[in-house]
Image: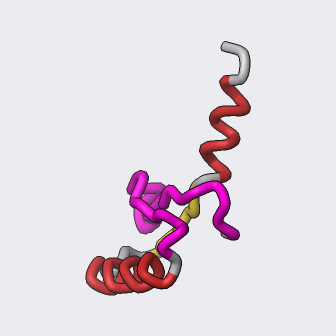
Amino acid sequence: MSGEFTELFQKSLQTIDLLFRNGINWDAFAHSFKKVEGENQDAKLDVQSIEKKGDRLLLVKLSTSSSVDK
């Protein structure tokens, strides 16, 4: 179990969290994601998870390389 917290903490540093209120326009999200991904190819962006955080809140976690300036 040694190092478990450190591993979890390092994983959280390799994510970008996007919080959407009142839903999300998936077409706009996909377009923006592809644009940012194309402009920052070293970032290695990927959707890690999508979580509902209440009635009208949606959390999208993006994984990225550790060298990216978030």
Colour convention of the picture: secondary structure
Q: Position of residue 40 (x, y in %)?
A: 52, 77
Residue at the location (67% across, 42% down)?
10
Residue at the location (57% across, 57% down)?
65
Q: Nearer the viewer, residue 56 or 16?
A: 16
Residue at the location (69% across, 69% down)?
69
Range shown magenta: 41-69
Q: Position of residue 44 (x, y in %)?
A: 47, 63
Residue 51 in sight in this render: no
Q: Is residue 54 magenta?
A: yes
- Left or right: where 6 falls relative to 40: right
> Image quadrant for the N terminus?
top right
> Image quadrant for the C terminus?
bottom right
| Residue projecting furthest to the front | 42
Residue 31: image quadrant is bottom left
* Residue 5 sits above or below residue 28 on the image: above
Q: Position of residue 25 (x, y in %)?
A: 32, 81
Q: Is residue 9 magenta?
A: no
Q: Position of residue 9 (x, y in %)?
A: 69, 40
* Residue 47 sits above or below residue 22 on the image: above
| Residue projecting furthest to the left | 27
| Residue projecting furthest to the top | 1
- Left or right: where 43 falls relative to 50: right
- Left or right: where 10 falls relative to 64: right
Residue 37: image quadrant is bottom left
Residue 31 in sight in this render: yes
Q: In this figure, what is the number of numbered marks?
A: 0
Residue at the location (54% across, 67% down)?
43
